[in-house]
Amino acid sequence: MASSTTASQTELKQAKVPLGWRDQCSALLLPLNVCRKEKMYMPWECDHEKHVYEKCQYDDYVRRMKVLSKEKLAAAQEQS
């Protein structure tokens, strides 16, 4: 299930992104890492890219928690 925020495995491999960071927001991580390298990891640079990436991470977390909640509710209803 590829989306606009998911990079391909070849892109991630070329960018040397560790396996743990290859998630739903991986396409947003690539420009963030490029910006960080260009700006020599200055903490006040790349704020926009970082904000977009962290927002995507948060939205993905909320989505997964909603799915988990629905699954738990369905399992509880099946038991009763």
Image (cartoon, rainbow, N blue to C red):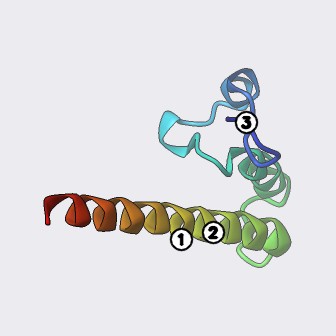
Mark 1 and mark 3 lie on one chain; the one further toward the N terminus is 3
Q: What residue is shown at x 68% (from left), y 25% (from top)?
A: 9
Q: How far apart are marks 2 and 1 (CA)?
A: 5 Å
Badge 3 density bin: few <14, some 14–19, many ≥20, Cα 10 Å: few
Callouts 2 and 1 close, C-beta under 8 Å: yes
Q: Mark 3 points at which residue?
A: 2
| Residue 31 image offset from top left, x and y in percent | 83, 50
Quadrant in the picture for residue 56: bottom right
Q: What residue is shown at x 48% (from left), y 41% (from top)?
A: 20
Which three-letter amino acid code belongs to the residue tagged 1? Val
Q: Is residue 54 left or right of residue 77?
A: right
Badge 1 density bin: few <14, some 14–19, many ≥20, Cα 10 Å: few
Which three-letter amino acid code belongs to the residue tagged 2? Asp
Could you say which disc has been placed on residue 59 in the image?
Answer: 2
Label 3 secondary element: loop
Q: Can you say whether 67 is above or below 62 in the image?
A: above
Which three-letter amino acid code belongs to the residue tagged 3? Ala
Badge 2 density bin: few <14, some 14–19, many ≥20, Cα 10 Å: few
Q: What residue is shown at x 29% (from left), y 64% (from top)?
A: 72
Q: Quadrant of the C terminus?
A: bottom left
Q: Name the residue under label 1.
A: 62
